[in-house]
Amino acid sequence: MTLGMADDLSATKSSPPCKLCGGATGQFIERNSHPIVKCRECGFMFALLPPNVSAETQYVNDSYFSAEAAHGITDYDSLWDALVSHMYVPRLKRMLELGGRGGKHLDIGCAGGNLIVHASELGWECYGVELSQTMRSCAAQRTGRPIFASLNEARESGLRFDSVTMFGVIEHLEDPSGTMRQVAAMTAADGMIALSTPNFENPYAISGALIDIWFIPPEHISYFNRSTITGCMTEAGYRISAMDGIFGAWRAWAGDTSFPRWLTAALKPWRKNKRLRPGGLLGAILKRAYGPAARPELYRRRDPADLKSAEVLEIYARRAGNET
Ligand SMILES: [Zn+2]
C-alpha cells in the first residue's frame, strides 16, 4: 500500500485536461492552498488558480518588484545585476556559439532592461516586453529602446525577431503552449530562442529546499522537466539546438552572496520569506568567507547526461523554417 507518493495520483472530477497534451490529470500536491495537478500522459504539472486570481495581474501590479510583495522579488535590481553578469551574458554568448545571429532581439520579461543593455553591447537591435509599468519605463529610460507592454503589443508591431530570450518566464504562465506559439509566430524563420525554467525533476523540487523557485503558486504555476519543456517548444514550432543544466543557481537566489547550502538552510527560519542579507560584522565575515571573491563561479553548466538533477534548465532552439 502506498500513500501520497509522487505518481499515485488521485482522480478528481474537477481535474482539468493537461494544458500541454490534453491528457487526463490527477491531483498531485497542494501548495499555498492551490492544488497542483499532474498529467498522467506527459507528466506536465500545473497549479489550479481560483477564477478570481489571474497569473498576470501580479506582475502588472508593481509590488511584485518591491519589498512589499508577499510573493515576488525583493530588491530586484541588485539580484538582477548578479544574475545578468553571471548567468545571462553567458547565455547570450551561448546563443551566438550555437549559430544565433543576434539581429533584432526581443527580451520577454525584461524588467529593468539590464539584459538589453548587455545584448545591445553585442550589437543586437533590442526590444523588450514587460508587464509592470514601473519596470517598463525604467527599462525604456535605461536602454532607449522600445519596451512593449505585452506580447500582443509586440506582435502588433509587425516585427519578426532573429533572437528571443525568455528567462524565468514560462513557469509564470497560465497558458504556456499558447504563449510559445505566439512567440514562435514572432520569431523569424531559423531565428533562435533561449529560454530558462526551473527543472521539476530536481530532487529538491518537492521539498522546496534551498531556493524558492519550486512549487510556489500563484507565482510559479507551470512546472516543466526536460521532456515537457521540449514537447511544449517543439509543438510551438521550434527545433531544440541544445539543452544545458545549471547547478549552483541556489547561490544566486539564496541571498546576494554565495552562501553554502548548510548555512542557507540553517538560517531559513529567520529569513521569513525575505532574502538573506546580514549586515555588520557577521555580514562582513560571511562575505569574506563565501562572497563572490571567494567563489567567483556562481553557477556552472553540466553535460546533458547530468541534467536530471539540474536546478534550472536552459533550452536553446531554432524556429523551424517556413516550409508551409
Ligand atoms: Zn500532458
Image (spheres, rainbow, N blue to C red):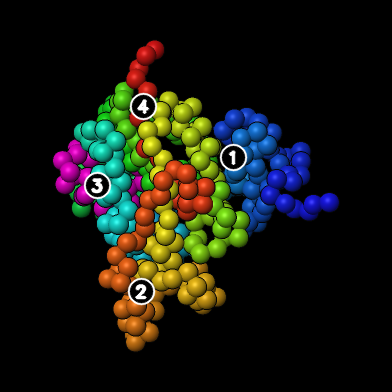
Q: Secondary structure at mark 4?
A: strand
Viewed as shown, does residue 53 lie left or right of 179? right
- Compute the Cα span from label 4 to label 2: 41 Å
x and y percentages locating residue 261 in the rendered image: 47, 69
Labels 3, 4: front one: 4
Instruction: Return the disc, 1 or 3, that comes first in the chain's sequence.
Output: 1
x and y percentages locating residue 143 in the rendered image: 20, 49
For label 2, count other residues whose C-alpha is less than 10 Å away and answer few (under 14), some (14-19) or many (20+). some
Q: Which residue is mark 2?
A: 290
Q: Which residue is mark 3?
A: 116
| Mark linked to residue 44 | 1
Q: Which residue is mark 4?
A: 319
- Residue type, numbered disc 1: Phe
- Residue type, numbered disc 2: Tyr
Q: Is mark 1 within 8 Å of ligand 1?
A: yes
Instruction: Return the disc, 2 or 1, that comes first in the chain's sequence.
Output: 1
Quadrant for residue 216, please give it.
bottom right
Labels 1, 3: front one: 1
x and y percentages locating residue 220 in the rendered image: 52, 51
Span shown in magenta: 108-126
- Compute the Cα span from label 1 to label 3: 31 Å
